[in-house]
């Protein structure tokens, strides 16, 4: 792996006070996401970095952990030291039985 190691957390390690930043695409978000998460698609992060808290724990989430890892690395390079990647992404979140909600009236699911 190139560059600094990206810090990760497991679904079980995510505290109730963590700021959940979901960087998936809109269709993925609509299908299912963690309750209380904040949606900010990966490609919009550079233009909307001011929306990412610089204090408190920020857990970045995607489907499997790849895109969120890239976002964590990017934010760390921009000076954030409070960002963590959700190991295994929403697939891991769902597999561990963590709560999920959808925006389309269907049962929450991971696309």
Image (spheres, rainbow, N blue to C red):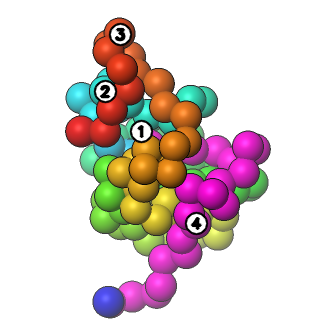
Position of 38 relative to 23 (above/below)? above
Position of 8 relative to 39 (above/below)? below
Please indicate whether residue 17 sits to the left or right of residue 60 in the image.
right
Q: Which residues are magenta?
A: 2-22
Residue at mark 2 = 31
Residue at mark 4 = 9
Q: Residue at x 44, y 71 (%)?
A: 73
1 vs 2, front mark = 2
For disc 4, the neighbor class at 10 Å (few under 14, some 14 to 19, many from 20) is some
Give the spatial CA distance, label 4 vs label 3: 30 Å
Please indicate whether residue 106 sits to the left or right of residue 14 in the image.
left
Give the spatial CA distance, label 4 vs label 1: 19 Å
Residue at mark 1 = 40
Q: Residue at x 64, y 44 (%)?
A: 19
Q: What kind of element bears circle 4?
A: strand
Q: What kind of element bears circle 1?
A: loop
Tell me which label, 3 or 2, sits earlier in the chain.
2
Tell me which label, 4 or 3, sits earlier in the chain.
4
Q: What kind of element bears circle 2?
A: helix
Position of 11 relative to 43 (above/below)? below
Residue at mark 3 = 105
For disc 1, the neighbor class at 10 Å (few under 14, some 14 to 19, many from 20) is many
Quarter containing the N terminus = bottom left
Toward the viewer: 99 or 1?
99
Tell me which label, 1 or 2, sits earlier in the chain.
2
């Amino acid at each position: 792996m190139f560059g600094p190691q990206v810090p990760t957390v497991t679904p079980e390690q995510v505290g109730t006070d963590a700021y959940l930043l979901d960087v998936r695409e809109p269709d993925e978000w609509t299908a299912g996401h963690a309750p209380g998460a904040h949606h900010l698609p990966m490609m919009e992060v550079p233009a909307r970095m001011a929306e990412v808290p610089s204090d408190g724990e920020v857990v970045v989430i995607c489907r499997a952990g790849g895109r969120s890892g890239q976002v964590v690395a990017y934010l760390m390079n921009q000076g954030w030291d409070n960002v963590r990647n959700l190991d295994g992404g929403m697939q891991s979140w769902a597999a561990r039985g963590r709560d999920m909600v959808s925006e389309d009236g269907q049962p929450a699911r991971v696309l």
